[in-house]
Amino acid sequence: MSTLQPSFPARWTRLSIAGQACTTCKTPPPPERSLLRCTRCKRAYYCSEDCARAHFPHHKKLCRILAALLFNYIDEQPCEDLAEWNRRVADRMVQLSNHLERRLDYQEQNLMLFEPRCHVCFVTALALELEISQDNVNPRTLIPCPKCRIIACCSEAHWDSYRSRHDTVCDKYVLSVSCDNLLFKHDDIRWMQKEYVPVDGPGSYPPLPTGGWPSYFSWRQFPEVLSDPEETATAYRTLLTDRLSQPLTILSALQLAQEPSALRALPTLTIHLAGASQHEILASWATEEIMHCIPALQSLHTVLIDPTLDSKPIINLSLAVCPTCTTRSRSRIFSTHALTYHDFVSSPHYTRPDLVVCFNSGLHEVDGEQWRPTLRHIVDSGIPCAFTSYNKKEVAEDAAVLRELGARIVCGPKRNEWGSEVPLVEPMGVDVFYGNSTWWFVVMGQK
């Protein structure tokens, strides 16, 4: 699975984008000195010449293009409003994509979307630096928040007008940065429960405990694996909710689709993830929690389907299981197919699943020709299907699409108590946050 993840030197964290950490090793600068900087593109920062040299093979092509696009920042004026800023960023992303002659990858998108800027007038750090100051010597610079370090203003006057608002959300930015840094250091943030939930008696599954993540971690005897600063332990636990959100949402949907006795005795399980993305790939290790919660389960097959996945399919790849599952001859299988779901249904690899899940589908926003045949199949087949969304507005609009198709909604739309607690920053807004799978609904056939 590691080959599907971004390479170590290629990943940019929010702090490194903001120039507050080394682009290569992500180390913040010590108080007594500043980071070195790429003099050509002015985007990459380094704690040492060794880190600069290590990053250069991965950076040189992008560096050359970013340097060529610096002219965009000369004489750039502050934006009148957020809409103008978003248009400006969109134009820059198009230019970068055209120069690269391909679509921007996730890291390149973030580099443009989270470019350091004033949170009041949206003037960028580069524009301030390239601005010819009155004495031609000392260009202005952004003033970052000393706590979160990724939010900045271009002047004390703008901080005075914005500080009270920022104070209400600064802790969210801090948690977001902490999760980002921890994920960089530990590509596979995970926690594998080694013991089964008892088949009988208190604590047996189903159902999942009520009360969301605190009750879950108590139920599963969440270990205090990190004895480090509280901020790190909190980030670790928060990242676990992001990874474990996938299997817990699946288990919650299965509870709605099957009687407890049938689910408890289930020997095999096939889950299809329609519209799957890199996020589902990275969280694939956590599907073993499904096996740990269904004691009779011997075989779990997770299939990811979406046209944007790698064109070379992965067919029945065996994933590692914990020692207890190994001794019980359990198997966990993983497959991918670069197809729309309705095309996959017609392929020789299709078998009827026990559940379909569309994580963060945003189906109301995309081309109807891509989703409508898939949704038609899901509704007509009667296969239970869970849909998750980033926020309340999106889940309501997604549910409306299913209602138009005559779907029977058996749960929601409502908050998903197994949604991720990682605060993700909406790059096209100001102080707007969202989370993976924080809202959901479940359909089962037609009305």
Image (tube, helix red, strand yellow):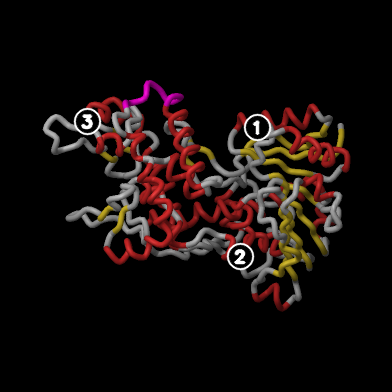
Q: Nearer the viewer, mark 1 or mark 3?
A: 1
- Residue 82 quadrant: top left
Amino acid marked by disc 3: Glu
Q: Nearer the viewer, mark 3 or mark 2?
A: 2
Horizontal placement of 219 versus 173: left or right? right
Q: Which residues are magenta?
A: 77-84
Q: Position of residue 409 (x, y in %)?
A: 78, 34
What main secondary structure does the magenta stretch of the protein show?
loop
- Between disc 3 and disc 2, whose residue precedes? 2
Q: Are marks 1 and 3 in contact (CB under 8 Å)?
A: no
Q: Position of residue 282 (x, y in %)?
A: 59, 57
446 within the magenta span: no
Residue 211 visible to an observer of this rendering: no
- Between disc 1 and disc 2, whose residue precedes? 2
| Front residue of 77 and 95 | 95
Q: Which mark is residue 14?
A: none
Q: What is the crowding at mark 2: few (fewer than 14 residues within 10 Å), some, or many (at least 20)?
A: few
- Residue 133 quadrant: top left
Secondary structure of the residue carrying tag 2 is loop
Query: Which residue is farthest left?
Result: 135
Q: Which mark is residue 365?
A: 1
Residue at the image point whose x is 74% and y is 70% from the top: 331
Q: Position of residue 277 (x, y in %)?
A: 63, 50
Disc 3 marks which residue?
156
Q: Which mark is residue 1?
A: 2
| Front residue of 232 and 367 | 367
Amino acid marked by disc 2: Met
Amino acid marked by disc 1: Glu
- Between disc 1 and disc 3, whose residue precedes? 3
